[in-house]
Amino acid sequence: MKTHAIIPIFIPHKGCPNDCVFCNQKAITARSADVSPQDVKNIIESYLPTLQGRNLQTIEVAFFGGSFTGIPMEEQAAFLKVAKAYKEKGLIQKIHMSTRPDYINEAILDNLKAHDADIIELGVQSFDEEVLTAANRGHTPDDIYRACRLIHDYRFTLGIQLMIGLPGDDMQKCTFSASETVAMRPAIARLYPAIVLNGTQLYKMYQAGTYTPLTTEEAVRITKAMYQILDDAGINIIRVGLKSTDLIREGGEIQGHTYHPAFRQLVEGEIAKEQLEGQLKELLEETQTQEPPKRSAEQPAKQRPPGKQMQAQRHNPPGLPDRQSTKQQMHTQQNGQRRPASPNPQKTGRPRGILSSDTASPNAPAGTVRPQNTPQAPAPHSFVFCASGNSFSNMIGNAKRNKIYFAKQYPHLKIKYKADPSLEDGRYVVVKC
Ligand code: SF4
């Protein structure tokens, strides 16, 4: 159950002197009306009745949009004063804002402290100097480090936003940014793939062919690596990807194929798949070493040298697709390359690696009669994949893609999917039946 709600207040940064390649603030602010302190009061008043009776522990008023601390200090103070009054009455618990690293200094933080602000989110985008320059951010990595230190010194809660796939960016630079984020000890983080919006410099670069947006698959692969770094460090990742409502506010029209409306689920679904497959492979390996060596249909065990029998099983164990081909499949998928065909039970008439109980060897000539001592086919291995109720849809994957993947990749296994309330969110467990 949700215990936390945000009242978002969009403060456009009119006259922002920067010109980040991905930003269309100028187009938005040109057509958006000024926001006044009275508007802030009206927005809070309209939200509060909808949040009552929901057992929320925390309600935040959050000033998003351009760069809150870049607007004139007296305007900041006027907005903050409104929010502070609600905080003093106990109607909201936190005041939150987003800004740029180079708009943080002692005077700004003193003003925020005087108005009882709590959370400062920095639009860091990248810790790589080349990426920051190519994105025309107008600040350096040193500005980020300095701002993070100051925010901690003033005992505000720090948040960091990173963007994936800006010009000059790559997997290594993105994971470096995630590692540096961990070093800055933020409490919260957001991960956004760069989206090409009409009316931006990035759009012009895209049209000129000097910028190629990430595909959805590439964006998922890189974001997944960053997500795991942040998650392992205990950072609360409050957003992954833009919501459709963000896009409407940002001007709506996008180019390229990076955007996906369920981007977070794509990323978390990939993580679930990786966890489940790792455990499944281990269990299959264990099963293989525990099971007594199996006899071939054509050749009873007594007539076969034991060493050779084991060798044959290691080469192509029962219950598993050929290991080499599995490795190739994993490798090619990780690299986003063409996926080789999965073992197809429809083609062969039965799953690979399992001896059918009513069929002689496929190599046996027609009319071959099964020898009396041929062993019965082993029952297909059954597994249950478990996740908490909240993580169940990630386990299944967006549009059931994980379920489809496991059914194709392991056609000889029986796999059930179960919600287990005893599991914590984001943890996936494979149980062998
Ligand atoms: S992203 Fe922020 S700093 Fe950059 S141009 Fe837009 S409003 Fe200005």
Image (cartoon, helix red, strand yellow):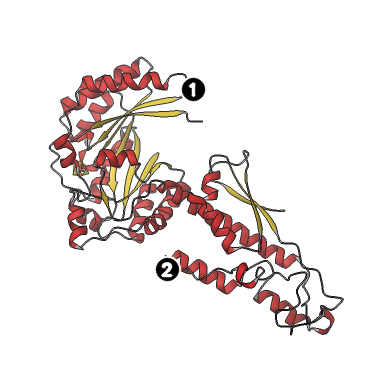
Residue lying at the far top in this picture: please name it. 89
Rendering coords of residue 23 (x, y %): 21, 46
The mark found on residue 345 in the picture is none
Rendering coords of residue 222 (x, y %): 39, 57
Seen at 37% across and 49% down, the residue is: 260
- Above/below status of 44 relative to 328: above
Residue lying at the far front in this picture: please name it. 367
Q: Nearer the viewer, residue 404 or 235?
A: 404
Rendering coords of residue 405 (x, y %): 54, 59
Q: Nearer the viewer, residue 356 or 132?
A: 356
Q: Is residue 287 left or right of residue 261?
A: right
Seen at 34% across and 41% down, the residue is: 244
Seen at 30% across and 36% down, the residue is: 151
Picture quadrant where residue 392 is located: top right
Q: Is residue 186 visible?
A: no
Q: Is residue 295 visible?
A: yes
Seen at 16% across and 41% down, the residue is: 27
Q: Is mark 1 within 8 Å of ligand 1?
A: no
Q: Amino acid at mark 2?
A: Gln
**Nearer to us: label 1 or label 2:** 2
The mark found on residue 55 in the picture is 1
Q: Quadrant of ligand 1?
A: top left
Q: Residues within 10 Å of mark 1 (few under 14, many from 20)?
A: few
First of labels 1, 2 by sequence position: 1
User: Could you say whether the residue bearing mark 2 is in a helix, strand or loop?
Assistant: loop
Q: Nearer the viewer, residue 53 or 379?
A: 379
The residue singled out by tag 2 in the image is 337
Whether tag 1 and tag 2 are in contact, CB under 8 A, the answer is no
Q: Residues within 10 Å of mark 2 (few under 14, many from 20)?
A: few
